[in-house]
Image: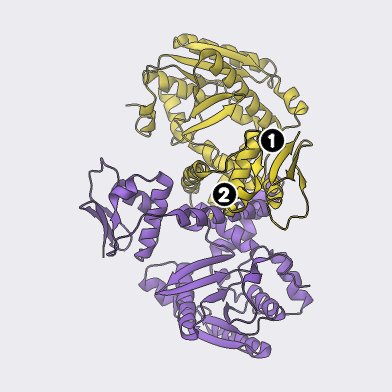
Chain colours: A yellow, B purple
């Protein structure tokens, strides 16, 4: 019996005979996922490893470790390399954001070259809970509470990626047990998740403290909330019907008649489609203020010197 | 200038010339709200105070304090009294839940007698944040994340109440300042909110700890998330179109074609309409399992010895 199969039925949608990408950092979680998928009969996997150039010599060791692992399981291997630290400075992003962008760029490149648009990632239940809390505390409500779904779509540089997370119902403890039972080797700290001290603080200090204070376990409850939020957001997104003009503008009149919840989601979707970075609640509310019939201003600022203007009943983005 | 007016525009919808109920415990927040509404020109207020019989002799002192306050402002006063402790035992509810039920019963009674269905309550921004966290940690995602809105409807014993919370964008600090500036007297600990040690732990220990660990303020971010959640839930609720049969059953076929997010919300709405208590995520998921074409069971359990059965393509509740 395989421990993913007992938890997920949605994997049936992904035939073991097809080709899939799988992101493998070399850390415990992705090593466990790879083994698990191989055991489930997925033979045409393409192991994708991005060297973030963040850990000096260790980065190269991680890459060789993953390459050997792929060879051992007789599956393909794709290596990419990005100077994430330089990228983060250049684009004025946090290291974590830059690392994520770099990974998705790399995945999209491989997807295009290999003509294979589905990628398995090893995010698990604890990741979901920690991400939910981090985004809650950072105020990323519009863009982050439902960030992780079992199956989701993401467009990266004209490439449509389908992201599949088979471990989203599996807890770290269960993965640890699986790793021990199968005597899997992995690279400590290779996981990209460990790039962020914030996540470690939430994991090791915030959650245990709250559990002690309240005298109850909270992870499962937050996990449930995150799952509900993901499905509700996904449904709301599917309801968004305001059409973007061919030139990428947004019709003010159509927007104005929507309930506030849909105005916000529509603006979010529009800004994302225009590749606007770091879209937070405040930015969305600023854009939304242009929709008000009584709005006195016709221009609001976004990050990185970009602006939204209202002109002739339409919203435009200035580059 | 009045500090509520600067924060809220929605109060314009409630003409100062009409009659409104206002819940006043005698605590700082409700005393501030009452004063503020009076200053705004609301003259036909009916001050509603429920004695919860939880604080021994203090309960009666609170009631007399509020009665005098109403007399001072020349507005009406309604007093109710409920043995909340007995109610909590009888209905197997927590003290907090029993207290809330008792208050709403009392408000509904006054609303009916006075033919006035709108009540102002003094919940503020910190209450919203704390309630959000408590419900998140307790796993009340389906029923609690969006529990507080500026304007919401609630049906209590055939009475439709409109609940208005003018202070939802005002922080405790701002209320403190207002109370000091106006030299308002209030009863320490009279606030019903202090009934729960859980809320105090979240307020005094959990939030400050998280802020220290993360090195940032989190209240405003959680407040935003709670506001977004409230509006999205409210919109989703408005979309629920599955009709209940006249006899209160739920059609399985109609339910089955809905996306999961709407199945959950529809079941929640249905169980609430049938007065099922303590509806959590697990209960909803159990009921949802009856909708699956492959479901082998035709009966699932709810709290307090109630059951849901599937029969002839419909879901029924057994009392």
Mark 1 burial class by Cα count in 10 Å: few <14, some 14-19, many 20+: some
What residue is shown with label 1? A276
Mark 1 to mark 2 CA distance (whole Å): 19 Å
| Horizontal and vertical percent position of residue A57 | 68, 15
Observer-side mark, 1 or 2, equals 2
Residue B165 x, y percent position in the rendering: 60, 68
Q: Is the N terminus of chain B in the top left, top right, bottom left or bottom right quadrant? A: bottom right
Considering the image in quadrants, where does the C terminus of chain B appear? bottom left
Q: Mark 2 — residue?
A: A262
Up-down relation of residue B233 to residue A102 (above or below): below
| Closest to the observer, A171 or A150 | A150
- Farthest residue to the left: give it: B312
Looking at the image, tell me whether mark 1 or mark 2 is earlier in sequence order: 2
Q: Are marks 1 and 2 on the same chain?
A: yes
Q: Quadrant of residue A60?
A: top right
Q: Residue A265, how many percent across, how many down?
A: 59, 45
Mark 1 chain: A
**Is B73 placed left or right of A176 in the picture?**
right
Height in image: B45 above or below B134?
Answer: below
Task: Tell me if mark 2 has few (under 14), some (14-19) or many (20+) residues whose alpha carbon lies within 10 angstroms of its own.
Answer: many
Judge whether residue B279 can be spotted in this image: no
Nearest the viewer among A246 and B203 is: A246
Mark sitting on residue A223 = none
């Amino acid at each position: 019996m395989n421990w993913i199969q007992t938890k997920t039925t949605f994997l049936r949608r992904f035939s073991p005979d097809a080709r899939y990408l799988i992101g493998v950092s070399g850390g415990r979680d992705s090593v466990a996922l790879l083994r698990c998928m191989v055991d489930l009969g997925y033979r045409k996997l393409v192991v994708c490893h991005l060297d973030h150039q963040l850990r000096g010599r260790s980065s190269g060791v991680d890459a060789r470790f993953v390459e050997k692992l792929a060879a051992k399981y007789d599956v393909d291997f794709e290596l990419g390399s990005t100077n994430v630290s330089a990228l983060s400075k250049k684009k004025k992003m946090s290291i974590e954001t830059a690392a994520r962008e770099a990974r998705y760029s790399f995945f999209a490149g491989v997807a295009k070259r290999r003509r294979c648009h589905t990628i398995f990632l090893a995010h698990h239940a604890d990741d979901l809970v920690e991400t939910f809390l981090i985004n809650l505390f950072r105020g990323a409500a519009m863009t982050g509470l439902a960030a992780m779904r079992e199956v989701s779509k993401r467009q990266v540089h004209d490439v449509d990626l389908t992201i599949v997370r088979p471990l989203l119902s599996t807890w770290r403890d269960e993965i640890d047990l699986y790793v021990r039972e199968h005597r899997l080797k992995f690279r400590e700290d290779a996981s990209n998740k460990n790039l962020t001290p914030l996540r470690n603080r939430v994991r090791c200090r915030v959650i245990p403290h709250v559990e002690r204070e309240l005298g109850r376990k909270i992870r499962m409850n937050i996990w449930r909330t995150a799952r509900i939020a993901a499905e509700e957001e996904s449904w709301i997104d599917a309801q968004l019907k305001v059409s973007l003009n061919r030139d990428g503008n947004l019709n003010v009149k159509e927007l104005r008649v929507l309930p506030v919840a849909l105005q916000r989601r529509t603006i979010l979707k529009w800004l994302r489609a225009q590749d606007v970075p770091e879209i937070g609640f405040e930015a969305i509310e600023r854009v939304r203020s242009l929709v008000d019939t009584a709005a006195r201003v016709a221009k609001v600022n976004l990050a990185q010197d970009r602006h939204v203007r209202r002109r002739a009943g339409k919203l435009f983005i200035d580059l």
